[in-house]
Image (cartoon, grey):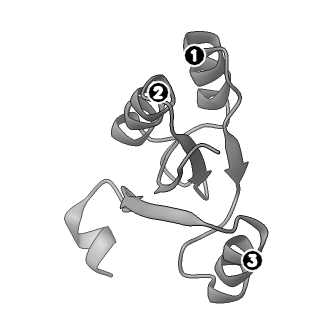
């Protein structure tokens, strides 16, 4: 079984490149992104590059109920890489 890695903000620029590298390294990334700073079509690009359609959940990380459901749905998550943030520092802090 491949090791599962949760990637928050996984459809953003850095997150999506990380997802590609995780897939190429033999991991199973699970993307969580609310698409506030990205686009759903990024998933098509990931699949085109890797041949793998990664698991994706449209969840805001501040939504504790749905994040809890995510951890129930995807058991055995080994690690979390967090890229979930707004583009401007002020927005992220707020």
Question: Which residue is labeled 1 in the image?
Answer: 50
CA gap between label 2 and label 3 equals 24 Å
Question: Which residue is labeled 2 in the image?
Answer: 20
Q: Are marks 1 and 2 in contact (CB under 8 Å)?
A: yes
Quadrant for the C terminus in the image: bottom left
Location of residue 47 in the rendering, given as x and y in whole percent from the top left corner: 65, 20
CA gap between label 1 and label 3 equals 27 Å
Disc ID at residue 62: none
Mark 1 or mark 3: whose residue is earlier in sequence: 1
Quadrant for the N terminus in the image: top right
Q: Are marks 2 and 3 in contact (CB under 8 Å)?
A: no
Question: Which residue is labeled 3 in the image?
Answer: 72
Pointer 3: residues within 10 angstroms few (<14), some, or many (20+)?
few
CA gap between label 1 and label 2 equals 7 Å
The residue drawn where x is 59% and y is 18% is 45
Compared to residue 41, the image places residue 89 above or below, namely below
Q: Quadrant of residue 70?
A: bottom right
Left or right of residue 88, residue 64 in this image: right
Q: What secondary structure is found at the residue carrying circle 1?
A: helix
């Amino acid at each position: 079984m491949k090791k599962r890695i949760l990637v928050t903000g996984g459809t953003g620029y850095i997150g999506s490149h990380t997802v590609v590298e995780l897939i190429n390294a033999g991991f199973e990334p699970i993307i969580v992104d609310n698409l506030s700073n990205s686009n759903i079509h990024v998933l098509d690009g990931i699949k085109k590059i890797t041949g793998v359609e990664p698991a994706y959940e449209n969840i805001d990380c501040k939504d504790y109920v749905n994040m809890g459901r995510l951890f129930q749905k995807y058991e055995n998550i080994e690690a979390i890489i967090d890229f979930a943030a707004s583009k401007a520092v002020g927005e992220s802090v707020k």
